[in-house]
Every structure is written in C-alpha cells, then in structure tokens.
Image: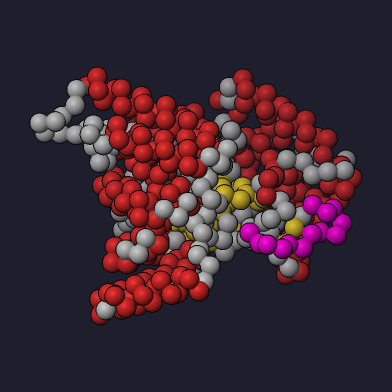
Amino acid sequence: MESVEVFTSEGKGRGLKAQKEFLPGDVIFAEPAYAAVVFDSLTHVVCHTCFKRQERLHRCGQCKFAHYCDRTCQRAAWLNHKNECSAIKKHGKAPTENIRLAARIMWKIEREGSGLSEGCLVSIDDLQNHVDHFGEEEKKELHADVQSFLEFWPPQSQQFGMQYISHVFGVISCNGFTLSDQRGLQAVGVGIFPNLCQVNHDCWPNCTVIFNNGKIELRALSKIAPGDELSVSYVDFLNVSEERRKQLKKQYYFDCACEHCKKQIKDDLMLAVKQGESKPSAETVKEVVQFSKDTLEKINKARIEGLYHEVVKMCRECLKKQEPVLGDTNIYLLRILSIASEVLSYLQMFEEAADYAKKMVDGYMKIYHPNNAQLGMAVMRAGVTHWHAGLIEAGHGLICKAYAILLITHGPSHPITKDLEVMRVQTEMELRMFQQNEFMYYKMREAALKNQKIQVMPEPSNETSPGLFHKKE
C-alpha cells in the first residue's frame, strides 16, 4: 500500500502516516473485511455478503441460516461460508455474532496462515487485544465466548490454543468495526479490518471512515501533507472533553492526549449558558442540567415503548426550562432539539420539527468539524424536514450544505450521496418554480402530495448513527 506507511511513536504505539499529499474527500485507502458477520438480530433481513438490507433474501439451502440478495452474493460468500455452513448444521443452530466472527477469522487463518494477508499492513497476530486490561465482567464474557467457541468449532478443523482464541476475541472486542447498511443509516454488522486498526484516535481527526460497496474507505477530511499522522475519531465529538476521555478509557483503554482534550477546546460552547442581563445563577444552571439528564432518561424509556406523543410532550416541557437558561450550543439543549425534531417529523408535525431542526443545526455548525459525517447527516435530515414543512428556500439551502459535506465524508458514489443529489436537483427545480410564482408552486405541491402517498419519515430509533468501532454493551 503505497499511500500510507506504518510507524511507531512513543506513547501511542503503532500508527499510520501519509506517504503523499491528500486533499479533503480523497480516498486514502479502501479495504475489504478480513472477516465480517451480520448482527444476530438482523441475520434474516441483511445480506451476509454485501450487508445490504433487502425485502426478500434467498436463504442458504444447507444451513438455513445465511441469507443473500441473489445467487451472485451467495457464490461470492461460499469461500467464507463453506466451513460455517457445515459447522452450523452439525451444531444444530448458529452461535452469536462474536463466535461466528472469531470462527471466520480462524478458518481464514487455517486457509492462509496467520502471516500478512494480501494488501494488509499488519497480521491478525500483531493486532492489539487489550485482554490484560479487561475488568472482571469482561473476563467473564471472554471466558463464556471461548467456551461457546470450543463447543461450535469442528474437531476436524485446525485446533488453536486457549491463549490464541482469547487473543482473537480480544481483537474483536477492541477492533471490531461497525458495518452500516447501504445508506449508512443503520448498524447491521461487525468486521475486522487490519489496516484500519492501525489508525489512531483524535477527537478532531483529519480522516473519516465510511463503509461503501462492501469495503471501508479511509477518506481525508482536511489537507494532509506527506509524513502527517492519519487519525479518525473513535467517539462522537458532541461531548465535553472529560466525558470523551472517560468513554475512550473505558472502551479502548487509553488516555486521550489530543489537543482538543488537553486544551478542552469547545467545552465552553458545549456547556454554554445565556449571557447578558438575564444570565442565570450557577444554581439555576445546575438544576436545569439535572432536569435535562432526568428527562433524557425518561425519553429513552418512552421511545423504547413507542410512546412518541409522550416523548414530544417531555421535549416541549424540557425546552421550556432550557431555553431561558442554556446557550444555543449547550449539548443538553442540542440533544433535546435533536430528539424533538426527529420524533415530530415521524409524527408528520413538520413545521414544529423544522423549527427545532434549524436550531439544532445552527448549534452543531459551531461545534463540529465542518466536514464531520454526523454533521452532514444531521443537516440532510433538517433539509428534508424543511421540505416536508413546505419551507422550500431553507430546505434547499440545507440540502445543498449537506451535499457539500457528504461529497467529502462519503464520496459521490455512496448511495446516500446519490440520494441527496436527486433531492438537491428536485428542490432546486421547486425553488425556481417558487420564485417565479409562489401561489402556483403551493397549488402544484398540494396536488402532487394528494396524488402520492406521503413519504413517512423513518421510525425514531434509540440508536445514534453507527459508531466507528463495535463494542458489546
């Protein structure tokens, strides 16, 4: 791989650095999975080869477990599925996703050896497992996984020692990358990508990772000079530095020393309160923040139960308390605005949803990196909500902004970018019509909406957008 090289630095261990210059949107490398599996809960609705969600999938006639888009996907999967298929039949049922992924890794090692695979900068043996850092609960889970694996693993296959099996499960725990569906909206599986595992974390990274057309792409977010270290963010930036550091320590076993954490950059924005004559007291701020935290917990429970009107009621009540006290970039205000706009859109209350979405996006723009993928997706959803509300000027502007971000973070060939390009062209035509004759535009829009089923926004989910690495809860 000529574009990058592995290096070792003090404190961080291994990392990757650029061998040449990259501009925003450039693909630094694309990597197929060393091994990957669909999540247990989605094995019947997601293709086990390309990870696309489909209405109707073809089931493997032998094990009755694996599902595929068509014969092409089934044939492409056979090398990796052959041993798995036979083992599932003998075992009587498919094991959990962790066991299936570990088995696929070890069948590949059985076929190819444990050295460097083609296109890999590092072998599975050399990936970090962090087993030594596991707490008691994690050690129990590891032991249970190893026992389940030994029950599933066929006696005629190559036998591995307990230490090596534990190493593979440790690698999965620390380096399992979340795979999303074809539109990048839902996490559908987990895979191991050895080259990606070499990219270190930074809360304000110069790269992002996208799953596109069966491969992960490492894409540049800013100009990268030859010799610069490549970095991605393992966690969402929308949290104060102390919380991000806690999360990174708990999930990935390191202390983040990036500039944004050391200098607590943007923490002031994320904890902002109203200024001026009506500046609230520290006690009032504390009360409102605690009320916000309690409300978010109640909202999560209500969303799980599908009580969306109750969610809207709680959001409105919380916003009423927040708006006189918290600044427009405060993370507790932004979290409530995000939930309110999403749920109201689903309930087709688009005008109120658009108002909240606009405030949310204005706050995000001041906090996130300008080329952040989550920012791009949030701006896109806000644009669609404004279009549904009949606010064509604002809707088109937001869709154009989102398209510019996603061209860099996802690239022009990604399905979500293609969808956005269609929306951009459509809203541009509508805007022209609106500017020529506002009355006629609304008449034609009303007629068009009557003649077609209104596109229902997706049902709100408790999941945030897919994270970079998959961690068992």
Identify the residue at image location x=52%, y=54%. 458
Q: Residue at x 36, y 26 (%)?
A: 291
Taking the image as shown, residue 203 lies to the left or right of residue 183, namely left
Q: Residue at x 50, y 74 (%)?
A: 451
Residue 378 in the figure: left or right of residue 107: left
180 to 103, vertically: above or below: below
Residue 258 visible in the snapshot: no
- Give the x, y percent position of residue 175: 56, 41
Tell which of 256 and 295 is nearer to you: 295
- Residue range (magenta): 53-65
Q: Looking at the image, which residue sits at the far left?
A: 277
In depth, the one of 226 and 303 nearer the eye is: 303
Q: Observer-nearest residue: 154 or 306?
A: 306
Residue 264 percent coordinates (x, y):
27, 33
367 over 76 or under it: above or below = above
Please identify the dominant SS of the magenta region.
loop
Q: Residue at x 48, y 42 (%)?
A: 309
Q: Report which quarter residue 421 is drawn in.
A: bottom left
Residue 350 quadrant: bottom left
